[in-house]
Image (cartoon, rainbow, N blue to C red):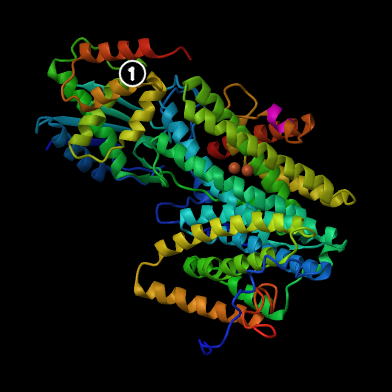
Amino acid sequence: MKKLLQPDELARDARFSRVDMAERFNDKRTVNRDVDGEPGISSRNQRRLSPDTPGASDAARSLMHGIFVGEIQALEGAGRTCWDFEVGAGEDKVPFELKLDMARQCWDESRHCEISIKLSEWMGTELGEFGESAFLFQAACNADPVLRLTGVNRALEGLAIDVFNTMREFGKVAGDPVLEFCEDWMLADEVTHVKMGSDWLRRLTEDNPERRERALEFQRVVDKLFSLGGARGENDDSPIKLARRFRELAGFTNEEVDEIAGLAKEAAEELAARQAS
Amino acid sequence: MAKVTVDPTEFHYVKFDADTIAQLVGEVADLVGLPADALININIDESTPLGRTVLTSTDPITLSIEGGAFENAKAPRELSERSVRDVASRLLFRVSDRLSGRFDDAPPEGEVPLPHNVAWDVHSVGRSARAGINVSKPRRLYHFRNRHGFNDVADAAFETLWNADQLSWAELDALVTEVAAAKTPA
Amino acid sequence: MGDPRTPRAPFAPWDRRELPGKFDVEETARRVGNYKWIEMRLFEALGGWVATVPELDVKLRLGTHCYHHAWHAELWHKRLPELREMNQDRLTLPANDAVVTFMDAVTEPGDLEQTIEKLVGVYRVLIPHKIAAYTYHLNNTSSITDAPTMRSLRFAIADEIEDWRDGEMLLQSLLRDEGDVQRAATHQAKLETLIMKAGGITGPGSIGDAYDIGEGR
Ligand SMILES: [Fe+2]
Ligand SMILES: [Fe+2]
């Protein structure tokens, strides 16, 4: 079996269809934030999820499907980290215990997929109903294990914390006992995964500030991409709200969360500029 | 078959085809049972990926559609024939209800309260399913529960709405009132 | 297959409960090091395969089983220093070169059309051999001096049997015509030959010697 798989090589059954990121970026259609409309099928709703808006349930279904395929990619990313790197001391190698953490994460993400599948059924969503973008897995393609772990476990898994917290709140407000239950459990695991990323980043770059800076820079790039054109933010009406408290539990400092909030702002401005041009 | 016009006739933001949409809506109008000489206008705002759909008028029948409502969720900017049938049948059953006299007491479109809108849609989509249109009952149920509560009373009302062939506004209003009473405050 | 009339021991080598303590500390550590090496190769491959398998149920089972074997590797890793090997890496080894050849062949299939080969390698060849070697070890070691190893072996065997059943059932459900059955059988025969040449996952004597009839029996 080869090492270092690319996003377009991820194996899926015929129900799933891959959406090209370039296609999404080239989409010139704009979203009017002030309209209380149904979210449309493209999952780009720009308002906070609330059962009081007409399209909330379809927006939740679309977001939940995005989470589901994200869980598959997180599983695949953790699995590939088990396979791609040998145990050892060099920069292209990893400690034995790091691999054990990744294997544990495989199990967790498998359960998250199972939860997501049951939840999809509960929400009336067919598997593969929405297109899948492989942009999350992109973070898992880095050949430097520290950069990969920082991209996956701090950026991707950090996004998962924000999304799960948002969905848990939505479930609570809507009175949906199943949604709230599922998000609560997944959120607990994701905090663990982000903490793994924070801990390994610290341990593996203890004597190598230059490598640590490279990893943090990679995280900034990934975090900006994961700001989803500003859909993630700190405002009360942000569709995905930065979950400060859970991020702190997972080893983020206050300044680090501030920085992500700043990146989200930049991403929103860049999207607006692209759509205006 | 009803005469359907689609505006615009050519699309730039999305890869829709006006003739295909007109053909599909015409077929759906027949399934819904609208008169063969009915005139139906479809106005599409292709510049937004959102999916709001509005019955703007029953005379002439006019549907205002945001492009996202007809979009293929698996392939951005592509037309989904299933979505066109789904949306058109839901709105055209409402047209047929409004023309029947049974919904004369209903507020005008735009003023129908959200809980009633959601309930009315269930009534329409249930009939779409029986007319042979490929709609998703679980999706509607989830939508209904989000609005009306995750409880047995709401689920029973959903089944009534879904299975009924000819409700009146008064009957629909009574069901909405019943589920509202059962819903625990959020 | 040899002559079926060749005499065999009336008590099989793995049924020796009344004579415990077949392994000294050094041999136990050697075996435990082999176990850790095998468990690592296995969990790494299962993790790697997850992304290459299109069947959703198989993907999720592999992700789950990946952790089981990582945990076994951790148990063996922690046992080694208790067996006087403070540098675990020194004993985290394959039993012989033929075991490496075998594991390379097990983990070789990488294409998305090769789910059958992937599952055959793990669930019809490797895991049955692990269950065999672990069982042999469990039934032959001293239940007094080596109780910690036995405890880990029992946990591992319980997982292996559960996982074997999972994998075998997935495999049965994937074999849908004669061609599939043939593919599975051919691959199994190839791998079985390799592990036979290796003598099992800890080399010759992995499950004792069933033809050792001893003296005067
Ligand atoms: Fe997850
Ligand atoms: Fe995770």
Which amino acid type corresponds to the residue marked 1 in the rendered image?
Val
Q: Position of residue A141 (x, y in %)?
A: 65, 56
Chain letter behind tag 1: B
Above/below status of A31 relative to A140: above
Residue sitting nearer the eye, A155 or B36: A155
Residue found farthest to the bottom:
C3
The quadrant where residue C175 appears? bottom left
Q: Position of residue B182 (x, y in %)?
A: 37, 13
Left or right position of A122 against C11:
left
Residue sitting nearer the eye, B2 or B160: B160
Q: How many marks?
A: 1
Q: Which residues are magenta?
A: A244-248
Residue found farthest to the right:
A207
Report if residue A148 is visible in the image. no
Above/below status of A115 relative to A31: below
Q: Position of residue A259 (x, y in %)?
A: 74, 34
Residue C57 drawn in magenta: no
**Residue assigned mark 1:** B153
Above/below status of C30 relative to B6: below
Residue sitting nearer the eye, B74 or B128: B128
Residue found farthest to the left:
B36
Left or right position of A202 against B172:
right
Other residues around mark 1 within 10 Å, as few (<14) / some (14–19) / many (≥20): some
Identify which residue is drawn at 73% across, 32% down: A249
Quadrant showing the N terminus of chain B = top left
The quadrant where residue C70 appears? bottom right
Left or right position of A164 against A174:
right
In what element is the residue under mark 1?
helix
